[in-house]
Amino acid sequence: MIALENVTKTYGQHIALKDVSLRVERGQIAGLLGRNGAGKTTALNLLTGYFPPDAGKVTVDGMDMLEKPRECKRRIGYLPERPPLYDEMTVRDYLGFVSDLREVAPGDRKRHVGEILEVCDLGETADRIIGNLSKGTRQRVGIAQALCGSPEVLILDEPTVGLDPKQVVEIRSLIRRLGEGRTILFSSHIISEVQQLCTHALILHEGRLIRAFDLREGPMGENGTLRLRLSVRGKESELLPAIRSIPCVRQAERLERTDPDTAEIRIVGARQDDRGLLTDQLFRLLAALDAPIRRLQPERDDLESVFLEATSGT
Ligand code: ATP
C-alpha cells in the first residue's frame, strides 16, 4: 500500500501539489490522470522517495518514507519517464547489475534475473545490447529493471508514451499481468488506457486531486450517486409516480423510447449503498404492477466525460 497524506510540494514559488491525499492498496492498478503540468510526475517522485514533501506524509505499507526510507524504497520499483538504461550492456547483464543494487543475494541473482526475463517476455532478447533494441523492448527492459529485488509496489511514469500501437498493447498486457498481487500506480495522458487497465482512477488538476474512482464498481455519478437505467413494459404515467414513491429513489425521469411497448426510465438513488435495497423494492413494485422488466443496468459516466468536466474551465 502506498499513500500521500495531505502532501504539498513547491518548486521555488511554484506550488506543484497542494494538500494531496491518495492511497493505492495491494491488488489495485491505479491510473493517475492529468493534463500537462498537473503534478503527476511530482506525485510519483514523492512516492518513490526521490524528494521529500514540503508538508504532509508519504507512506509505504504504513511506514513513513522520511523515517524509514530504506525499508520504503526497497518495496518500490520505479519506471521513470526516461528509463535509466545502460545502452552498452546486454539486457541480462543490466538486470543482474540492478539486482545487485537492489540487494538480491548473489546466489539468487541468476534465478531472479531469469524469472524477470520470462515475466517480461525478454528471453530472446536477454543477450542483446540494450542500445540496439526497439523502443517497445527498451520499455519492457525499463519495467524489468523496476521488478529487480521483487518490489510489491510498481510506479510507472507514462509507461506507453511514444510506443507504436502493437508495443502499447504488449506493455498494457504486461502491466495487467504484473498487477496481480502487487500495487501499481502509473501516470497517463490516455483516458481509454486508464479505463481499460486500471481498477482505480485518480484525476489530478493544477496540483490538486479532484476525483478518485473505483472503476470496478457501479456508476461514477457525482459524489457516489446511484444511477440506474430501467427498460420496462408499461406506461410512464403509471410507472413514474410509483417508482418515485420508493423511499430511496431521489429522482425518476422518462427517457426516449426505442420500442413502443417499453418505457425507458432513469432512476437516481440517494446513495450507492442503497443499490441492493432499491433494486429489491423496484422488483417488488414492478411485479405488483404487472410490469415486466426488460433490462436494468447501472448507468456510468464514461471516464472521458468525467475527466473533461472535472478539468475544464481553465
Ligand atoms: P507532464 O504530463 O507534462 O509530464 P506532470 O503532470 O507530470 O506534467 P509535473 O512534472 O509534476 O507535472 O509538474 C508540475 C508542475 O511543476 C508544472 O507546472 C511544472 O512546470 C512544475 N515543475 C516540475 N518540476 C519542476 C522543477 N524541477 N522546477 C520548477 N518547476 C517544476
Image (spheres, grey):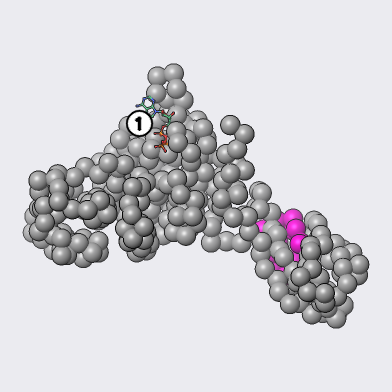
> Which quadrant of the figure has residue 82?
top left
Whether residue 155 appears in this view of the structure is: no
Looking at this view, is 98 or 277 the one in front? 98
Looking at this view, is 189 or 33 the one in front? 189
Name the quarter where the C terminus is drawn: top right
Position of residue 51 in the picture relative to residue 6 (left or right) = left
Q: Looking at numbered disc 1 in the image, what kind of residue is underneath it?
A: Pro
- Residue 108 in picture, x, y percent from top left: 12, 60
Position of residue 221 in the picture relative to residue 132 (left or right) = right
Q: Residue 8 colored magenta?
A: no
Residue positioned most to the front: 164
Mark 1 closeness class: few <14, some 14–19, many ≥20 residues within 10 Å: some
- Residue 124 in picture, x, y percent from top left: 15, 65
Magenta stretch, residue numbers: 266-279
Q: Which residue is mark 1?
A: 52
Write the residue at 78% across / 74% down.
259
Write the residue at 66% across / 49% down.
222
Q: Which structural element holds mark 1?
A: loop
| Residue 14 drawn above or below residue 295 | above
* Disc 1 C-beta below 8 A from ligand 1: no
Write the residue at 18% across / 53% down.
133
Write the residue at 14% across / 48% down.
131
- Residue 273 in picture, x, y percent from top left: 67, 60
Query: In the rendered picture of this protein, how many numbered marks are placed on residues?
Result: 1
Whether residue 107 appears in this view of the structure is: yes
* Image quarter for ligand 1: top left
Residue positioned most to the top: 13
| Residue 199 drawn above or below residue 296 | above
- Residue 294 in picture, x, y percent from top left: 73, 77
